[in-house]
Amino acid sequence: EGLADSKRLAIDGGSAGGYTTLGALAFKNVFTAGCSLYGVASLEALASDTHKFESRYLDGLVGPYPEAKDIYKERAPIEHVDSLNCPILLLQGDEDKIVPPNQAELMHAALKSKGIPCALKMYEGEQHGFRKAENIQDALDSELYFYSQVFGFDAKGVKAFDIDNLEESK
Protein backbone atom coordinates (compact mmCIF):
# COMPACT_ATOMS: atom_id res chain seq x y z
CA GLU A 1 0.00 0.00 0.00
CA GLY A 2 3.02 2.29 0.21
CA LEU A 3 2.37 3.32 3.82
CA ALA A 4 6.03 2.85 4.79
CA ASP A 5 9.30 3.43 2.97
CA SER A 6 10.63 -0.10 2.53
CA LYS A 7 14.19 1.28 2.29
CA ARG A 8 13.86 2.88 5.74
CA LEU A 9 12.03 0.25 7.73
CA ALA A 10 13.56 -0.31 11.18
CA ILE A 11 12.70 -2.54 14.12
CA ASP A 12 13.61 -2.24 17.79
CA GLY A 13 12.85 -4.02 21.01
CA GLY A 14 14.13 -4.72 24.49
CA SER A 15 14.68 -8.03 26.28
CA ALA A 16 12.43 -10.59 24.55
CA GLY A 17 11.71 -7.79 22.06
CA GLY A 18 15.46 -7.48 21.53
CA TYR A 19 15.56 -11.18 20.71
CA THR A 20 12.60 -10.66 18.38
CA THR A 21 14.46 -7.77 16.73
CA LEU A 22 17.61 -9.83 16.18
CA GLY A 23 15.51 -12.77 15.01
CA ALA A 24 13.52 -10.67 12.56
CA LEU A 25 16.76 -9.29 11.13
CA ALA A 26 18.43 -12.72 10.97
CA PHE A 27 15.52 -14.81 9.72
CA LYS A 28 13.50 -12.40 7.54
CA ASN A 29 14.34 -9.85 4.87
CA VAL A 30 11.85 -7.11 5.80
CA PHE A 31 13.74 -4.49 7.82
CA THR A 32 16.69 -2.37 6.76
CA ALA A 33 18.04 -1.58 10.26
CA GLY A 34 17.41 -2.47 13.87
CA CYS A 35 18.16 -1.76 17.50
CA SER A 36 18.30 -4.47 20.16
CA LEU A 37 18.14 -3.33 23.76
CA TYR A 38 19.47 -6.00 26.14
CA GLY A 39 18.32 -8.68 23.70
CA VAL A 40 19.19 -12.36 23.49
CA ALA A 41 21.58 -13.35 20.70
CA SER A 42 22.49 -16.87 21.85
CA LEU A 43 19.89 -19.08 23.50
CA GLU A 44 22.62 -21.50 24.55
CA ALA A 45 24.59 -18.79 26.30
CA LEU A 46 21.42 -17.53 27.97
CA ALA A 47 20.60 -21.02 29.25
CA SER A 48 23.99 -21.23 30.96
CA ASP A 49 24.66 -17.57 31.89
CA THR A 50 21.41 -16.11 33.20
CA HIS A 51 20.68 -15.85 36.90
CA LYS A 52 19.17 -18.77 38.80
CA PHE A 53 15.56 -17.48 38.76
CA GLU A 54 15.52 -17.39 34.93
CA SER A 55 17.77 -20.40 34.39
CA ARG A 56 14.99 -22.89 33.50
CA TYR A 57 12.77 -20.34 31.72
CA LEU A 58 13.82 -21.51 28.26
CA ASP A 59 12.91 -25.13 29.01
CA GLY A 60 9.23 -24.35 28.46
CA LEU A 61 9.82 -22.06 25.47
CA VAL A 62 12.47 -24.00 23.55
CA GLY A 63 13.02 -27.32 25.29
CA PRO A 64 15.19 -28.71 28.05
CA TYR A 65 18.86 -27.88 27.68
CA PRO A 66 21.13 -29.57 26.64
CA GLU A 67 18.72 -32.20 25.24
CA ALA A 68 17.24 -29.63 22.81
CA LYS A 69 20.62 -28.10 21.89
CA ASP A 70 19.88 -28.25 18.14
CA ILE A 71 16.72 -26.17 18.57
CA TYR A 72 18.62 -23.63 20.71
CA LYS A 73 21.15 -23.21 17.88
CA GLU A 74 18.49 -23.14 15.16
CA ARG A 75 16.59 -20.29 16.85
CA ALA A 76 19.59 -18.21 17.93
CA PRO A 77 20.30 -15.07 15.87
CA ILE A 78 24.04 -15.35 16.62
CA GLU A 79 24.05 -18.68 14.75
CA HIS A 80 22.66 -16.96 11.63
CA VAL A 81 24.93 -13.96 11.25
CA ASP A 82 25.60 -15.10 7.68
CA SER A 83 22.04 -14.08 6.77
CA LEU A 84 22.27 -10.65 8.46
CA ASN A 85 22.81 -7.79 6.06
CA CYS A 86 21.60 -4.57 7.70
CA PRO A 87 22.89 -2.13 10.32
CA ILE A 88 22.27 -3.01 13.97
CA LEU A 89 22.62 -0.97 17.16
CA LEU A 90 23.05 -2.87 20.43
CA LEU A 91 22.29 -1.19 23.75
CA GLN A 92 23.17 -3.07 26.93
CA GLY A 93 23.55 -2.60 30.68
CA ASP A 94 26.89 -3.77 32.03
CA GLU A 95 25.29 -5.21 35.20
CA ASP A 96 22.47 -7.11 33.47
CA LYS A 97 22.08 -10.50 35.16
CA ILE A 98 19.06 -11.62 33.11
CA VAL A 99 20.57 -11.13 29.65
CA PRO A 100 24.28 -10.80 30.46
CA PRO A 101 26.43 -8.32 28.50
CA ASN A 102 28.22 -11.13 26.69
CA GLN A 103 25.08 -11.52 24.52
CA ALA A 104 25.54 -8.03 23.05
CA GLU A 105 29.32 -8.40 22.95
CA LEU A 106 29.11 -11.67 20.97
CA MET A 107 26.65 -10.18 18.50
CA HIS A 108 28.68 -7.00 18.09
CA ALA A 109 31.89 -8.94 17.41
CA ALA A 110 30.14 -11.14 14.84
CA LEU A 111 28.51 -8.17 13.05
CA LYS A 112 31.74 -6.19 13.08
CA SER A 113 33.77 -9.06 11.65
CA LYS A 114 31.20 -9.52 8.88
CA GLY A 115 31.52 -5.84 7.95
CA ILE A 116 27.95 -4.90 8.89
CA PRO A 117 27.47 -1.35 10.21
CA CYS A 118 26.96 -1.77 13.95
CA ALA A 119 27.55 -0.21 17.32
CA LEU A 120 27.49 -1.42 20.89
CA LYS A 121 26.79 1.03 23.70
CA MET A 122 27.35 -0.44 27.14
CA TYR A 123 25.68 1.49 29.96
CA GLU A 124 27.65 1.47 33.20
CA GLY A 125 25.65 0.58 36.29
CA GLU A 126 22.57 -0.45 34.33
CA GLN A 127 20.83 -3.77 34.65
CA HIS A 128 18.06 -5.37 32.60
CA GLY A 129 16.09 -2.34 31.44
CA PHE A 130 17.59 1.07 31.90
CA ARG A 131 16.63 2.94 35.06
CA LYS A 132 18.75 6.07 35.09
CA ALA A 133 17.03 8.98 33.33
CA GLU A 134 20.23 10.08 31.60
CA ASN A 135 20.74 6.59 30.16
CA ILE A 136 17.15 6.28 29.00
CA GLN A 137 17.54 9.63 27.23
CA ASP A 138 20.90 8.59 25.78
CA ALA A 139 19.47 5.30 24.51
CA LEU A 140 16.65 7.12 22.70
CA ASP A 141 19.04 9.73 21.30
CA SER A 142 21.49 7.02 20.26
CA GLU A 143 18.83 5.17 18.34
CA LEU A 144 17.84 8.39 16.58
CA TYR A 145 21.47 9.19 15.75
CA PHE A 146 22.09 5.63 14.51
CA TYR A 147 19.11 5.74 12.17
CA SER A 148 20.07 9.22 10.97
CA GLN A 149 23.46 7.91 9.92
CA VAL A 150 22.07 4.75 8.35
CA PHE A 151 19.15 6.40 6.54
CA GLY A 152 20.82 9.71 5.75
CA PHE A 153 18.86 12.37 7.62
CA ASP A 154 19.97 15.05 10.07
CA ALA A 155 19.37 14.40 13.77
CA LYS A 156 20.01 17.79 15.28
CA GLY A 157 20.91 18.04 18.93
CA VAL A 158 21.91 14.42 19.55
CA LYS A 159 25.38 13.26 20.49
CA ALA A 160 27.36 11.46 17.80
CA PHE A 161 29.14 8.15 18.44
CA ASP A 162 31.20 5.75 16.35
CA ILE A 163 29.41 3.22 14.17
CA ASP A 164 31.65 0.37 13.10
CA ASN A 165 31.82 -0.42 9.36
CA LEU A 166 29.53 2.49 8.44
CA GLU A 167 31.90 4.21 6.02
CA GLU A 168 32.82 0.93 4.36
CA SER A 169 29.17 0.19 3.64
CA LYS A 170 28.49 3.46 1.83
Image: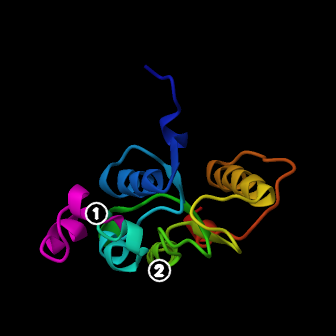
Q: How far apart, in angstroms, are the residues tagged by discs 2 and 1?
A: 29 Å
User: Residue 49's mark?
Assistant: none
Q: Quadrant of residue 50?
A: bottom left
Q: Work out whether mark 2 precedes mark 1 in sequence or the reverse, and give the earlier one.
A: 1
Q: Amino acid at mark 2?
A: Ser
- Colour setup of the view: rainbow
Magenta segment includes 73 = yes
Magenta segment includes 71 = yes
Instruction: Please say if the residues under marks 2 and 1 sit with CB atoms less than 8 Å apart.
Output: no
Q: Is residue 128 above or below residue 104?
A: above
Q: Quadrant of residue 119?
A: bottom right
Instruction: Quarter of the image for the C terminus: give it.
Output: bottom right
Name the residue that disc number 1 marks: 58
Badge 2 density bin: few <14, some 14–19, many ≥20, Cα 10 Å: few
Please name whichever residue, 19 or 157, is drawn nearer the observer in this view of the structure: 19
Magenta extent:
58-78
Name the secondary structure under disc 2. helix
Name the secondary structure under disc 1. helix
Name the residue that disc number 2 marks: 113
Residue 26 appears left or right of 167: left
